[in-house]
Amino acid sequence: MNYPAADRARYDRATAHLDAPLAIVDLAAFDANADDLVRRAGGKPVRVASKSVRCRALLERVLARPGFAGIMSYTLAESLWLARSGFEDVLLAYPSADRGGFAELAADPKLAAAVTVMIDDPAQLDLVDRSRDGGTQEVRVCLELDTALHLFGGRVRVGARRSPLREPDRLADLARAVAARPGFRVVGLMGYEGHVAGVGDALAGRPLRSRAIRLMQGAARKELAARRAEAVRAVRAVVPDLEFVNGGGTGSVQQTAAEDAVTEIAAGSGLYVPRLFDNYTSFRGRPAALFAQPVVRRPGVGVVTVLGGGYPASGAAGADRLPVPYLPQGLRYDPREGAGEVQTPLLGSPADDLLIGDRVWFRHAKAGELCERFDALHLVEGDRVAATVPTYRGEGRTFL
């Protein structure tokens, strides 16, 4: 029995007592992926990106492992909830306009000590001050560096449109503005190179595009390493006791960790390894998070229909944002229907071996977004469910 087929048999046995649809996390794969992230980080701590996990029990599990420290959150409401739950180091990766959240933060010493907020504009400080509602706690802030690669004199930009702070002197100017403003303290600097960390460089059947991506990423890493080091020097000249410099992501862990200026690495998708992370030359993870849909129809030869399954991921719309039928191997979507809201036809010879009530296992395109569809994750150990834990959704938390 080959490896995927053995996994399918194991997952079917482990969840035989459960009704599908359902979602699982294979703990052996999850832990192996965590070990690989630590190995690639080369001694620098890995901060876990919560948006890629969205399950408190699994955040606790990975943070209990050597090599991991802190959470990178995605909304202020989530950050405060995690801090109240006992997580002591939460870096909010995006600016917020949550006035109620800022009022809570500024009024509670425990929350203010645990949560760091992101800024890239003095206007964001103004919003915090207007939201304090009498709260006097000092707010920890992190400055975000724009990591995009500019080519041809800036006429071509490669990278996400995030921070406007590209030049080191602009970061230093903002650090000075924060230092001169009561109620705030700069503690960190962050730069997320998504065009390197989040873009696969080994696309199946597309060798020329893959080579072009590798060339782009090589140039981007070189340019960013020099500019990030300069930015860190500029900010440290204003804030000598800067606590951390965060960078990277699952697809660039070892390259970002090699930069002396970076003190910690951010990663999260590498724990679940969704389908978008199959196409990298720098690492190979094990699929750990999957969901199962039941077969409910057999419309004809070479066709089965499963219940639901239309769970597209965020980002630019395209086929790569769809879940992929994973087990049994060899199934594919009907191009006229794709992944449907309430039913999904699947084509291929393996369909003829599937009976009503059997399961098809899928992999989501992105990591934590799977948890927005399920209120629980069944944690599989060997061929049994070791525990069932709530996702954020299962705890009644839908932050975005």
Image (cartoon, rainbow, N blue to C red):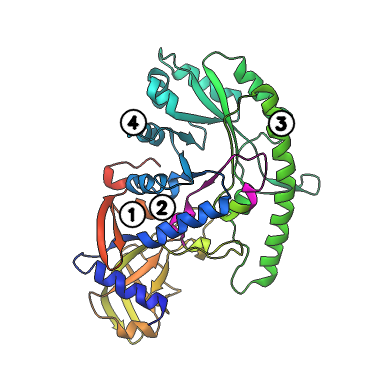
Q: Secondary structure at mark 3?
A: helix
Q: Amino acid at mark 1?
A: Arg
In which quadrant is the C terminus drawn? top left
User: Which mark is in front, 3 or 4?
Assistant: 3
Q: Circle 4 sits on which residue?
A: 84
Cα–Cα gap, marks 4 and 2: 23 Å
Q: Secondary structure at mark 1?
A: loop
Q: Circle 3 sits on which residue?
A: 233
**Do the numbered discs 1 and 2 sit on residues whose CB atoms are within 8 Å?**
yes
Q: Circle 2 sits on which residue?
A: 369
The answer to which of 111 and 124 lies nearer the viewer is 111
Q: Circle 1 sits on which residue?
A: 373
Q: Secondary structure at mark 4?
A: helix
Residue 195 picture location, percent across and down = 63, 52
Vertical position of residue 322 compared to residue 128: above or below: below
User: Which mark is in front, 4 or 2?
Assistant: 4
Residue 346 picture location, percent across and down = 37, 76
Magenta span of residues: 255-274
Q: Is residue 262 magenta?
A: yes
Cα–Cα gap, marks 1 and 2: 8 Å
Left or right: 291 in relation to 34 = left
Badge 2 density bin: few <14, some 14–19, many ≥20, Cα 10 Å: some
Identify the residue at horizontal 37%, vertical 63% (top origin).
290
Q: Earlier in the sequence, mark 4 or mark 1?
A: 4
